[in-house]
Amino acid sequence: MEHFFSLFVRSIFVDNMIFSFFLGMCSYLAVSKTVKTAVGLGIAVTFVLLITVPVDYLLQTQVLDENGALNQALLGGQDLTFLAFILFIAVIAGIVQLVEMVVERFSPSLYASLGIFLPLIAVNCAIMGASLFMQQRILMDPATETKAIGCIADSLAYALGSGIGWLLAIVGLAAIREKMAYTDVPKPLQGLGITFITVGLMAMAFMCLSGLDL
Amino acid sequence: MGKLFSKENQEVFSNPLNLNNPVVVQVLGICSALAVTSQLKPAIVMGLSVTVITAFSNLIISLIRKTIPNRIRIIVQLVVVAALVTIVSMILKAYVYDVSVMLSVYVGLIITNCILMGRLEAFAMQNGPWESFLDGIGNGIGYAIILVVVGFARELLGAGSILGFKVLPQAVYDLGYMDNGMMTMPAMALILLGCVIWAHRAYNEEKK
């Protein structure tokens, strides 16, 4: 239980998707002009992460790994990890489509607010990045490494933490940018340039949390 | 031969290098541009890998563009890119293992690099194979230039070395100079890239 909680908190504050790994930067910069849309995109990313990371975890441990149960049963134990990139991206693209259809069918109001962001998420590096980091962390020893992901509950905690960390970062930046509209920024620095420097300063603030260990 | 290097084709190749640079003007592919630039060597390897992948994915998609059904084009593009990235990642692991360890997941993340999807959607789906190939190389090199600039500045100021060789003489340190460890942190990558964008815009505005 302790490990589960530590993984969750670490992935929000210490291993923040934006501030320490720069994942999902493109949509982070493009969609952070107003707080309202930023919240929508943040929730959509968290939602998709929560589904794809555990699914990719099961695929990695059961199908791709040579000691996986399904791999043993169907193929007699062959190392298929070289297929990971293609399989993960196909799962992400497929699940994004599925989520879009389900949301449209059962909750038109949610679809109206999330709808435009969902197709964007298929090529958001935060989703693919979370799956690839999860793949690395399976190999770590859970007894010594707090970052290790040893079971499906761990992968869920990691996905939820990463999503919330991303949401926190995008909402914070959007709020700052809304206020910044009233300031006098030098002309060539306006827009993108000043946004980068703002994100850099936010990342510096988050660096203070890097010693956090639960 | 004359037609292959006509004026339009030269422009297709040279525009992304400066005026329409994928990183600082179109704001694509930022994630990896920031993450791999703490030293010069991984920045160069990453720039080369992305150039090869954009060029060949543009070429392949352009060759089969008329046979791809419109509804599933994103999946087709992703699969082509993922296959190329798998090949590149295996080559890197075989020949430059230490760099591939440094790049860690960012090689895999070339699949979701927005430059690739952007060029495939905006260019390769409408143009012939040769133009698309040139466009891919141009955008890849435009991306690599920014990576090298940021990687050079961060390694020089952060560790006083270039490509792992110490370039600042000991005499400078004796005078009281210190390496700025902050430069190797993620936060400074963002601020440096912000400054590169600032300089690029100011320069191009003056020319106009």
Image (cartoon, coloured by chain):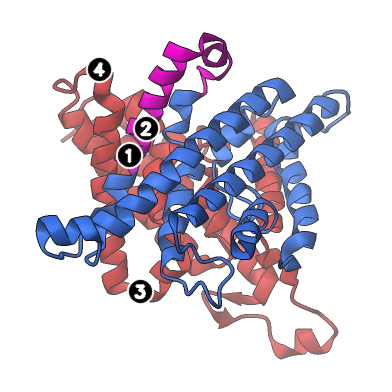
Chain colours: A blue, B red
Q: Locate residue B5, reporting x and y percent.
A: 25, 35
| Amino acid at circle 3 | Tyr
- Say whether mark 4 and mark 2 are on the same chain: no
**Label placed on residue A91:** 1
Going by the numbered disc 2, the residue's amino acid type is: Ile
Q: Quadrant of residue A78?
A: bottom left
Q: CA distance from mark 3 to mark 4?
A: 39 Å
Residue B126 shows up from this direction: no
Front of the two marks 1 and 4: 1
Report in which chain the residue with disc 1 lies.
A
Q: What secondary structure is marked by label 4? A: helix
The residue furthest left is A75
Asked whether disc 2 touches disc 1, contact meaning CB atoms under 8 Å apart, the reply is: yes
In x, y percent, where is residue A26?
55, 36
Residue A212 % position (x, y): 74, 65
Disc 2 target residue: A95
Q: In the displayed structure, would residue A84 be above or below residue A92?
A: below
Which residue corresponds to the image point at 44% horizontal and 46% vertical from the top-left? A53
Return the chain for callout 3: B
The disc labelled 1 sits on which kind of residue?
Answer: Val
Give the main secondary structure, helix, strand or loop, of the magenta stretch: helix
For the residues carrying marks 2 and 4, which lies nearer the camera in this image? 2
> Which of the labelled discs sits on residue B97, or is there none?
3
